[in-house]
Every structure is written in C-alpha cells, then in structure tokens.
Image (spheres, rainbow, N blue to C red):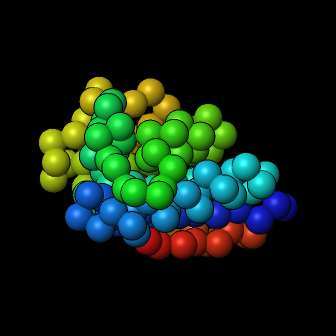
C-alpha cells in the first residue's frame, strides 16, 4: 500500500501562514504522487465555498485558490461536519467535489495502513 497523507487544516484567515502551509504541503505531496486527503476544519471550512479561496492572499505564497484546485483535481477535500454546521454550510453550498464528513471518517483515514496525519 502506498503512503498517504491526511492533512487537517484548522486555520483560515485568522492564521494565514499556517493555513497556506497546509494547502502547500497537500499540493506538493500530490505533485509528488502521494495520495492526499485534505480536511477543512474551523475557519478553513470557509474555503470549501466557491470564491472564498480567491479572497485569501498571503505575500510570497502560491495563491490558495490554485492550491485548492490542485488538491481537488488529484486528491480529496472534506469539510468537518460540525464545523460546517456551526457556519450554516450545507452540501449545496460547497465547491463541486468537496464532501462533508465527521470525526469517524477522519479517524478511519488517519489510522489506515500507510497513512500519515498532519494537523496545521
């Protein structure tokens, strides 16, 4: 079984460097052929909505929208169930290809054979 990364990003515009680092690592891993599952939690949940990643800017960093597009093209993007509910985000609000799932799904992915979980 190939090694995979399960990346949970807990920050959004409230901690832009940490947020961008998670997306950058996810996109770099995918470009290297590593399977990636990116979990958007807390303030990062907003980036599952159309146009929100384009509003994010961080000097000297790749555009978040481009990183998200790369992950959507080759990996999986999930929004935390509780985080979505607290923000009144429903499945109908999401970018195509993003799903909503809860802690049991995260745990299942994180403890799968060959998986490495990272939390930003």
The answer to which of 60 and 95 lies nearer the viewer is 60
The furthest residue to the right: 1
Name the residue: 47% across, 58% down. Answer: 60
Q: In this view, does 73 lie to the left or right of 8?
A: right
Picture coordinates of residue 80 (x, y %)?
35, 54
- Residue 103: x percent and y percent? 40, 63
> Residue at 15% across / 42% down in the picture?
88
User: Looking at this rendering, what residue extends furthest in the front direction?
Assistant: 60
Residue 27, given in percent of the width and then of the height, sits at: 61, 51
Decide if residue 35 is in sight here. Answer: no
Residue under the point 26% across and 58% down: 13
Q: In this view, does 115 lie to the left or right of 43?
A: right
Q: In which quarter of the image is the N terminus?
A: bottom right
**In the picture, residue 42 is in which quadrant?**
bottom left
Q: How many marks?
A: 0
Quarter of the image with the C terminus is: bottom left
Dividing the picture into quadrants, the one containing residue 51 is: top left
For image coordinates 70% across by 62% down, the residue present is 4
Residue 25 appears in view: yes
Q: Is 107 located above or below residue 55 in the figure?
A: below
**Residue 54, position in %: x, y?**
35, 37
Residue 27 drawn above or below residue 98: below
Out of 67 and 48, give the one closest to the viewer.
67
């Amino acid at each position: 079984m190939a090694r995979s990364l399960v990346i949970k990003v807990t920050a959004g515009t409230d901690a832009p460097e940490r947020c961008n680092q998670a997306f950058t690592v996810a996109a770099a891993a995918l470009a290297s052929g590593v399977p990636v599952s990116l979990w958007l939690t807390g303030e990062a949940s907003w980036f599952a909505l159309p146009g929100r990643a384009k509003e994010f800017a961080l000097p000297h960093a790749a555009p978040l929208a481009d990183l998200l597009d790369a992950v959507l093209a080759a990996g999986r993007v999930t929004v935390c169930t509780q985080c979505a509910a607290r923000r009144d985000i429903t499945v109908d609000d999401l970018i195509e290809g993003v799903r909503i799932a809860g802690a049991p799904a995260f745990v299942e992915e994180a403890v799968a054979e060959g998986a490495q979980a990272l939390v930003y």
